Amino acid sequence: MLKLIATKLMMAALVALTVSAISFSLVYMAGDPAISLAGENSTAEDIRIIRERYGFDRPVVVQYLDWVWSALRGDLGTSHYFNQPVSEIIMDRLGTTVTLGVSAIILALVIALPLGVVAAVRPNSWIDRLAVFFAVVGEAIPSFWFGLLLIVIFAINLGVLPASGSSTWQSFVLPTIVLGYFAAPALMRLTRAGMIDVLSSDYIRTAKAKGLKPRKILFKHALRNAVIPVVSLAAVQMGFMLGGSVVVETVFALHGAGFLAWQSISRNDLPVMQALILMFSMFYIVFTFLADVLNAWLDPRLRGG
């Protein structure tokens, strides 16, 4: 197990290094950042001053190494728009995004796992068809449209929940439902498919032949193996929720990190863009690493890899 963790850590470090290089180079792919910051009506002298002020006149490799070294020490630069340290701006917004993402993935798992298990135990029954219908609708509805629908029903017509803001816990109810319902269908489908496959395997038939109780077979022997791919998908979904909840945060006026990403792109705030891309990528890397370790704990056969 320790060997597996060490190997996964080395792979995660290599991926993180690659992602940092891509994150840094994305800014230069759009053109000269000094010209972009100076604006359309700037003169050559304005561009020269900006290039020297922000260090764009140095070799790109030197800029990248300096950026990585500063990031390792917690210094992500200064925002061109807010004129504040990027790390402070992100930390102010991160709490909202983490609260929303954690709430949404918990809601998605609470819905998807039981529904997927019941649908697999009773295939082609009414509850199986209901689960499939739930998944199809969830995958077909755009999140922004679903969010607006919930605002009209619960905030405007019924008046029981706020339509925007993040001042109270009630403000997170509707966006959590939208984001959780977006993630639940894929988790439910994978749980259902895994359980159907496991329940038809030889060792489950052997367990039944030995007279083990159905509940013990289902939860101790079948579900443990069936949830292994679900763990990996949940890790990816969690990374997406923390990094890609831009639409939901915009619809509900939640000023989290996702909304900050959209703002930084529209304002051409390069340090914030670089830091957010790097941070969102780190979320994926960390959650994927944790999922690999958890899967290895659930299935000893994976420890050999």
Image (cartoon, rainbow, N blue to C red):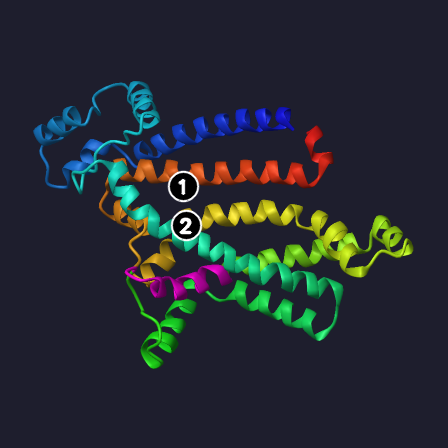
Amino acid tagged 2: Gly
Q: Residue at the location (73% across, 73% down)?
A: 125
Image vertical order of residue 82 relative to residue 57, above or below: below
Quadrant, the N terminus: top right
Q: Residue furthest right?
A: 209
Quadrant of res 103: bottom left
Magenta part of the chain:
166-181
Labelled disc at residue 264? none
Do labels 1 and 2 touch, CB within 8 Å?
yes
Magenta span includes 27: no
Q: Circle 2: is it few (<14), some (14-19), or many (20+) Cα within 10 Å?
A: some
Quadrant of res 64: top left
Labelled disc at residue 244? 2
Residue 284: percent from the left, percent from the top?
48, 40
Image vertical order of residue 263 relative to residue 39, above or below: below
Q: Nearer the viewer, residue 101 or 279?
A: 101
Q: Residue at the location (51% across, 40% down)?
A: 287
Q: Residue at the location (34% across, 52% down)?
A: 96
Q: Nearer the viewer, residue 146 or 93?
A: 93
Residue that carries the numbered disc 1 in the rendered image:
280
The kind of secondary structure the magenta stretch mainly shows is helix
On the picture, is 275 further left or further right than 269? Answer: right
